Image (spheres, rainbow, N blue to C red):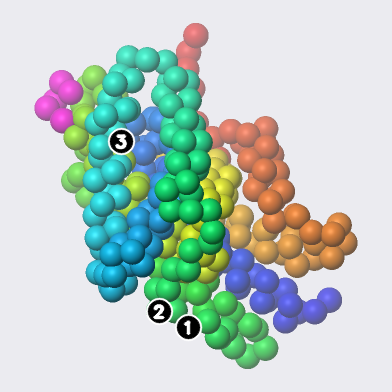
C-alpha cells in the first residue's frame, strides 16, 4: 500500500471537506435560528459566485472590490429572501416552508445560467495554479487556501454563536413565542441568519468557482452540505467542522481507491450513503441534540 498516496488523498480530502463544511455551516446557521432546513443553500452558493463574476468580468471591478461588494449584495439577498418569501409562510406547516426552499433551489438553478449563460465562467481570485509540494505529497494550492479560509470562517461562526447576538438567535430557535415575550425581535434574528448564511454560501461559491469555474454545477454543493450537516448535527456548528473533515476524507479515499475498481463516480455516491446511514443509525447526528417529545 502506497503510504504517500494515502497521505496525499487524506490531506487534500481534509481541505476539500472544510470547503464543503462552509456551505453546511450556512445550513446549520438557519436551522439553529428558525428550525428550518434551507434546501436552497447550494443555489445561493452558485448565485453568489455568479454575482461576483459579473461584478468583476462585466462591470470591470477588480477582484479585491468585487468580492466584498458581492458578499454585501448576497447578504441583502438573504435578508430579502426571508422578508419577502419566508416571512409570508409564518403559521404554515414546516414541510411547506421546506418545499418553498426546494422551489427556490430549482428556480435559481435554471434562471441564473439562463441570464449569465451556461458556459463555465473563469473566476480568477489570484490563487496560483501550480501545486504545492509537501515532501512527497502534492497539495492543490487552491484547495489548501480554500480549506484554510473555510476553517477560519467556521471558527468565527462558533465564536459568533457564543456572542450576545448569537445567544439571542439560539433563543429564537428554542422557542419563538417565548423570545417574543421577552422582547427579542424574532423576525430580525431570522433575517440576519439568512443574510449570514448567504454570505457563507457565497464565500464557498467563490472558493469553488476559483477551483472549477462558475456554472450551474456549484448548486450541487447542497448534497455535500446536507451530508455534513446531517452527520455533524443540524444544530451543531462544531459538528459541521468534524463532519466536514470526515466527509472530505471519505470522498477522497473512495475516489482514490474505489474509482479504479468500479470505473469512477464514487465521489458522488459517498455523500448519499452518509446521509442514508446517518439517518438510519443516528438521526440527530454526531453532535446534534436529540429532541424527545412526549405523546
Marks 2 and 3 close (CB-CB < 8 Å): no
Q: Is the magenta stretch mostly helix, strand or loop?
A: loop
Residue 142 magenta: no
Residue 183 magenta: yes
Secondary element at tag 2: loop
The residue beneath circle 3 is: 81
Q: Gap between marks 3 and 1, in whole Å?
A: 36 Å
- Which of the two discs, 3 and 1, labels the residue nearer the N terminus? 3
The residue beneath circle 1 is: 128
x and y, in percent, of residue 184 in the image: 16, 30
Q: Which residue lies furthest to the left in this view?
A: 183
Q: Gap between marks 2 and 3, in whole Å?
A: 31 Å
Q: Is residue 283 above or below residue 208?
A: above
Residue at 24%, 45% in the rendered image: 76
Does residue 218 show up? no
Residue at 67%, 88% in the rendered image: 136
- Which of the two discs, 2 and 3, labels the residue nearer the N terminus? 3
Label 3 environment density (alpha carbons within 10 Å; few <14, some 14–19, many ≥20): some
Q: In this view, does 4 lie above or below 280?
A: below
Tell me: 272 left or right of 223: right
Label 2 environment density (alpha carbons within 10 Å; few <14, some 14–19, many ≥20): few
Q: Which of 59 and 34 is in front in this view?
A: 59
Secondary element at tag 1: loop
- Which residues make up the magenta segment? 180-185
Secondary element at tag 3: helix
The residue beneath circle 2 is: 126
Residue at 38%, 62% in the rendered image: 53
x and y, in percent, of residue 180 in the image: 18, 23
Label 1 environment density (alpha carbons within 10 Å; few <14, some 14–19, many ≥20): few
Amino acid at each position: 500500500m502506497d503510504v504517500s498516496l494515502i497521505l496525499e488523498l487524506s490531506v487534500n480530502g481534509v481541505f476539500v471537506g472544510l470547503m464543503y463544511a462552509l456551505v453546511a455551516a450556512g445550513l446549520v446557521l438557519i436551522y439553529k435560528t428558525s428550525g428550518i432546513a434551507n434546501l436552497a443553500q447550494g443555489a445561493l452558493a452558485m448565485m453568489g459566485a455568479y454575482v461576483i463574476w459579473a461584478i468583476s468580468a462585466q462591470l470591470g471591478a477588480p477582484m479585491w472590490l468585487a468580492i466584498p461588494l458581492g458578499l454585501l449584495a448576497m447578504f441583502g439577498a438573504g435578508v430579502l429572501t426571508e422578508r419577502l418569501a419566508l416571512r409570508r409562510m409564518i403559521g404554515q406547516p414546516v414541510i411547506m416552508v421546506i418545499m418553498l426552499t426546494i422551489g427556490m433551489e430549482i428556480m435559481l438553478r435554471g434562471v441564473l445560467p439562463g441570464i449569465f449563460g451556461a458556459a463555465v465562467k473563469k473566476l480568477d481570485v489570484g490563487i496560483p495554479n501550480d501545486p504545492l509540494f509537501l515532501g512527497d505529497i502534492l497539495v492543490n494550492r487552491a484547495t489548501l487556501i480554500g480549506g484554510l479560509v473555510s476553517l477560519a470562517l467556521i471558527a468565527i461562526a462558533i465564536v459568533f454563536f457564543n456572542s450576545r447576538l448569537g445567544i439571542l438567535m439560539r433563543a429564537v430557535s428554542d422557542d419563538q413565542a417565548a423570545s417574543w415575550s421577552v422582547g427579542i425581535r424574532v423576525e430580525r434574528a431570522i433575517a440576519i441568519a439568512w443574510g449570514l448564511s448567504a454570505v457563507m454560501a457565497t464565500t464557498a461559491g467563490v472558493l469553488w468557482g476559483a477551483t472549477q469555474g462558475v456554472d450551474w454545477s456549484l448548486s450541487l454543493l447542497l448534497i455535500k452540505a446536507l451530508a455534513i450537516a446531517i452527520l455533524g448535527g443540524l444544530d451543531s456548528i462544531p459538528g459541521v467542522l468534524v463532519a466536514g473533515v470526515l466527509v472530505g476524507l471519505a470522498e477522497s479515499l473512495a475516489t482514490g481507491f474505489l474509482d479504479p475498481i468500479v470505473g469512477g463516480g464514487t465521489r458522488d455516491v459517498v455523500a448519499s450513503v452518509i446521509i442514508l446511514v446517518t439517518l438510519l443509525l443516528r438521526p440527530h447526528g454526531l453532535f446534534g441534540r436529540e429532541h424527545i417529545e412526549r405523546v
